[in-house]
């Protein structure tokens, strides 16, 4: 009897298991949600669709996932839950950005909201793509500029040109300004006195006795200034030759960068003398 009792219990258990309804598959649940949506039973459709999508989608195809987000968004919209509707529309749009909706199945207002969000996402993705492309181009250009070197050729004959030409070529700005100024002053004094004397007395004219001392003094200044000019010119030539390099290799500077890659200029304040009626003054300029 105990054996018979156990056999009957086992048969009862098997019958119970076979009689229990099998769990619905995701595809069947999706069909149930579709039916509820067609009946406009939003409250019945929403929990089924939500369970199919969250926390992770249980649907196998992208098309079904898109449809589930869309139907959930439409159900939420018709239930006056605009926040959820917007979120679900955007989730659907991300999957199929170019897909538009007709107004035959869904309400016009819901389709309008869907299209509004679609256009916003299309524009956002377009701008993001442009920014990424621009950032990529900038990075390529920066790397190119960093990898570049500039070979600057220097002419030998420039060393023999007075007024600091050799120093300027050697990128010795202060020396170049010194030689240019000193040679300019001494050369101008010597040439100026010579032209004055020639204009006053001619190349081989006779100097009156009354002007002899003044002319002699001017001639001494002329010769001294001329000698100083020649000495400065020779000094400048020697200095330029000593520091001369036929070519130099340097990194590119900011002048090679396009405007959008250059750093913002810093503001500077400058003072400059300026003539004024009855005197002079100083003008302050602010550059930014």
Image (cartoon, grey):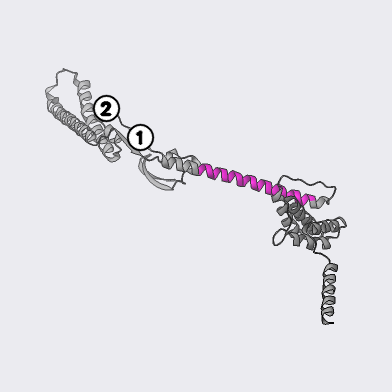
Quadrant of the rendered structure where residue 185 is?
Answer: top left
Residue at screen point 69% across, 60% down = 56
Please tell me how crowded label 2 is: few (under 14), some (14-19), or many (20+) other residues with Cα within 10 Å.
Answer: few
In this orientation, which residue lies closer to the viewer: 175 or 95? 95
Disc number for residue 157: 2
- Counting from the top left corner in percent of width and height, residue 22 is at 81, 64
Considering every residue shown, the one lying at the far right of the view is: 39
Range covered by the magenta-colored residues: 111-138
Indicate whether 158 appears above or below 252.
Answer: above
Q: Is residue 258 rendered to the left or right of residue 84?
A: left
Quadrant of the rendered structure where residue 198 is?
Answer: top left
Q: Is residue 231 rendered to the left or right of residue 260?
A: left
Q: Which residue is mark 1?
A: 151
Residue 231 lies in the magenta-colored region:
no
Residue at screen point 84% across, 71% down = 16
Residue at screen point 44% across, 40% down = 145
Please tell me how crowded label 1 is: few (under 14), some (14-19), or many (20+) other residues with Cα within 10 Å.
Answer: few
């Amino acid at each position: 009897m105990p054996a018979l009792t156990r056999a009957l219990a086992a048969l009862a258990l098997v019958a119970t298991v076979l009689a229990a309804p099998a769990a619905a598959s995701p595809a069947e649940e999706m069909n149930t949600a579709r039916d509820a949506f067609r009946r406009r039973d939003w409250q019945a459709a929403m929990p089924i669709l939500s369970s199919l999508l969250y926390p992770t989608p249980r649907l196998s195809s992208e098309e079904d996932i898109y449809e589930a987000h869309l139907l959930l968004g439409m159900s939420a919209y018709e239930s006056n839950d605009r926040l959820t509707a917007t979120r679900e529309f955007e989730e659907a749009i991300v999957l199929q950005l170019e897909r538009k909706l007709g107004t035959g199945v869904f309400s016009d207002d819901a389709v309008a909201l869907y299209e509004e969000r679609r256009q916003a996402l299309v524009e956002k993705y377009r701008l993001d793509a442009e920014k990424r492309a621009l950032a990529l181009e900038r990075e390529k250009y920066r790397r190119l500029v960093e990898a570049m070197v500039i070979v600057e050729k220097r002419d030998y004959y420039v060393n023999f040109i007075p007024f600091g030409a050799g120093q300027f070529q050697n990128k010795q700005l202060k020396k170049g300004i010194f030689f240019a100024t000193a040679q300019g002053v001494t050369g101008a004094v010597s040439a100026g006195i010579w032209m004055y004397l020639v204009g006053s007395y001619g190349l081989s004219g006779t100097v009156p006795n009354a002007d002899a001392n003044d002319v002699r003094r001017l001639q001494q200044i002329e010769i001294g200034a001329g000698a100083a000019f020649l000495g400065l010119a020779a000094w400048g030539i020697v200095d330029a030759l000593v520091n001369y390099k036929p070519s130099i290799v340097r990194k590119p500077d900011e002048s090679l960068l396009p405007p959008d890659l250059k750093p913002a200029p810093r503001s500077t304040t400058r003072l400059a003398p300026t003539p004024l009626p009855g005197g002079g003054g100083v003008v302050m300029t602010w550059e930014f």
